[in-house]
Amino acid sequence: MDEVKNINKTNFAEEFVDATEELVLNMGPQHPSTHGVLRVILKLHHEKVVDLDCDIGYLHRGVEKISETLSYKLAAPYMDRLDYISAVSNNLAYIETIEKLAGVEVPKKAQYIRVILTELARISSHLLWLATHALDIGAMTVFLYCFREREEILNIFEMVTGARLTTNAFRIGGLPQDVPEGFEKAVKDFCEILPGRISEYEALLTKNRIWLARTKNVGVISPEDAIAIGLTGPSLRGSGVKWDLRKAHPYESYNEFEFDIPTGENGDTYDRYLVRLEEMRQARRIILQAIDGIPEGDFTAKVPKVLKPPKGEVYHSIEAPKGELGFYVISDGSTKPYRVKIKGPSFYNLQALKKMCLGHYVADVVAIIGTLDIVLGEIDR
Amino acid sequence: MEFLLVVVVKIVIILAFISLGVAYLTYLERKVIGHMQVRLGPMRVGWHGLLQPIADGLKLVIKEDIIPTQSDKLMFILAPVICFLHAFLVYTFIPFDGPKGFWGYGGYISDVNVGLLFIVAIASVGVVGIILGGWASNSKYPLLGSLRSVAQLVSYEVAMGLAIMGPILLAGSLSMVDIVKAQEKMGVWFFVPQIVAFIIYFICGVAETNRAPFDLPEAESELVGGYHTEYSGFRFALYFLAEYANMITVSAIAATVFLGGWLMPFPSILGPYLSFIPGFVWFALKVFFFLFVYLWIRATFPRYRFDQLMAIGWKILLPLAIANLLVTSFIILYLKM
């Protein structure tokens, strides 16, 4: 009798130990909220995250290696597929790097149109970010509202480049062709409706108690940590660091436009949300200045059919919607680059995930992945 | 014999009506939310997509029935049935119309003296189906979902039970029919004297039925569907139907207990003109109102986090419900003295 009791006791004890074990939960690569094929391995205590590891590479296509086998011009469309949400910005970063390498001077008109298109891409990227971020937190309506405006931008892209998503918008030396008739009106019409639409999203979210509860003090990162990890873009500015390549190292004609750099204070999800909303407004400001001031002239510089940049290496980066997007290109004097290294913002921003998530709930992990605004096409390359 | 026949006919009518109502509630949801989100919702199957729920149902029935190999098979099969059964059982006690309604046969299947208690009790058993389903799937996301639902439903049940104590005290009866009759006698629907209880009840009702912003057990962006992640085909449909049937139940109880059930509004003014409208139409309108609010909330709000949800349940709703109950009892006691 006593023996039986003892056996039961030990069993209970063992079961109890088992019951308090940490739960390892695989989030992704197929998960609605990992924004692509990110795999996050979560260690949970109840619903709290005690450890976290990211597994990437599910979307690796070898873009860097492919571009070594192609001529400088042919590699450009591959860069659209990095951050497919703002293909125009990727294209610009690559094209500018090659122009810097080959010493090509771009006409003013092309520069202005490049600015307009990249700022439109910034708005569209932020709209998609807001849409998915809000959907992750459960606000379904914002998702569809944002897609409504993004559609307008994609229509403009279609008008100018013929494509909607992977636009391959620019060429080395300028633009593939002049902008079509009606471009100015379409852009101005869009700028007309945008502020009203942004206040619509704000009406649904900014002072919503649930939204505040879900985003305030979630995923906080201090400015020191943010710099140490290498965060760039809105994720860095949300922590209060006023760093924007458009102001710090102006490229194209950004020094000719007036705009502000919004920054947050607490470095939490809510601040990053406000920063991105304000960035959309500032982008609109730049577009309006640029569209009114498009100078006369050629839309492209004279570039040789076969481009052979001189021997050398160059690093050039731009402020993409998600942060600093840089290209490091080595030329050996032939028609193909010797090496192309891509510094994508999403890859660096993802490194903050662990620091932001520890001690938070599973639901917060989803919100934090959303607020970092990552795109797996660029992380895996 | 005639009594039996009447009951059977009523059961068939109510069951058919509720099943159809549940099916078309999904249609209503897609249409209402669709229009709120500047899109059209279903448009292809039938006129303005009116046959969509039937097409969906058909699709779910003919889908492959998948039972995960690692699951506890008996429980896996049983769980959605438990959920579904109890969601529909509740309608036995809900008065769709008064005792003279349904052309003199009485607008309900059964009126027992503990009706409301019975409804709350049976509705709670439905939770068992969710817990079992999450557990039997033997998978981590459903497990987390079902754990959340246990905590959520149990804690909101308490505040909900205390909230409906107020109207019960006013009516002095647990019978659903008597509660409506008491409102008729009092001349004012209970949502006026019991406004606090009414609000608490509705919030808890939303949480009870796992609807936004309290849809944590099945949060698709976090738990990929929660407790029913591993379910597909008609077993999934059973969960789905149970959820929507529960929505109608909560709305029906709210309409009966707080909004006067089958009674018409302002009988002294509208009575002479609108008395030809049968009671169940008024009842249906009131239920529809609550269902619309449900959908409206879903289109507007983000989702709460788990700990925030528990904090609201235990720290705000429960104390308020207790305070409401105490104040109501003291007032009734004072009036009787």
Image (cartoon, coloured by chain):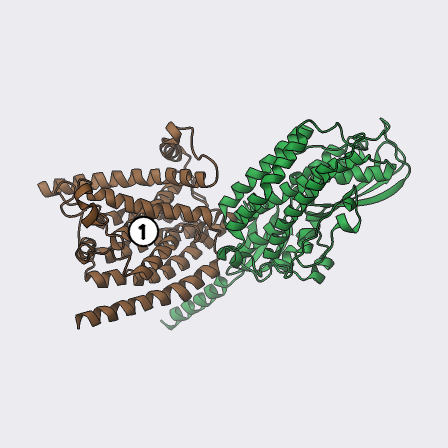
- Rendered green, the chain in question is A
Q: Position of residue B152 (x, y in %)?
A: 41, 58
Q: Nearer the viewer, residue B95 or B83?
A: B95
Q: Which residue is mark 1?
A: B250
Tell me if A105 is positioned left or right of B147 in this view: right
Quadrant assignment, res A180: top right
Regarding residue B89, the answer to whether it shows in the image is yes
> Number of callouts in the render?
1
Regarding residue A338, the answer to whether it shows in the image is no
Under mark 1, the amino acid is: Val
Question: Measuring 64% from the left and 57% from the top, which residue is drawn there?
Answer: A354
- Rendered brown, the chain in question is B
Q: Nearer the viewer, residue A81 or B256?
A: B256
Tell me if A151 is positioned left or right of B309 in this view: right
Quadrant assignment, res B69: top left
Q: Nearer the viewer, residue B224 or A280?
A: A280
Q: Is residue B222 above or below residue B18?
A: below
User: What kind of element bears circle 1?
Assistant: helix
Q: Position of residue A322 (x, y in %)?
A: 68, 47
Question: Measuring 21% from the left and 38% from the top, which residue is drawn there?
Answer: B13
Q: Quadrant of the C terminus of chain B?
A: bottom left
Tell me if A362 is positioned left or right of A230 in this view: left
Q: Position of residue A314 (x, y in %)?
A: 85, 43
Q: Nearer the viewer, residue A326 or A283?
A: A283
Quadrant assignment, res A120: top right
Q: Is residue B335 above or below residue A86?
A: below
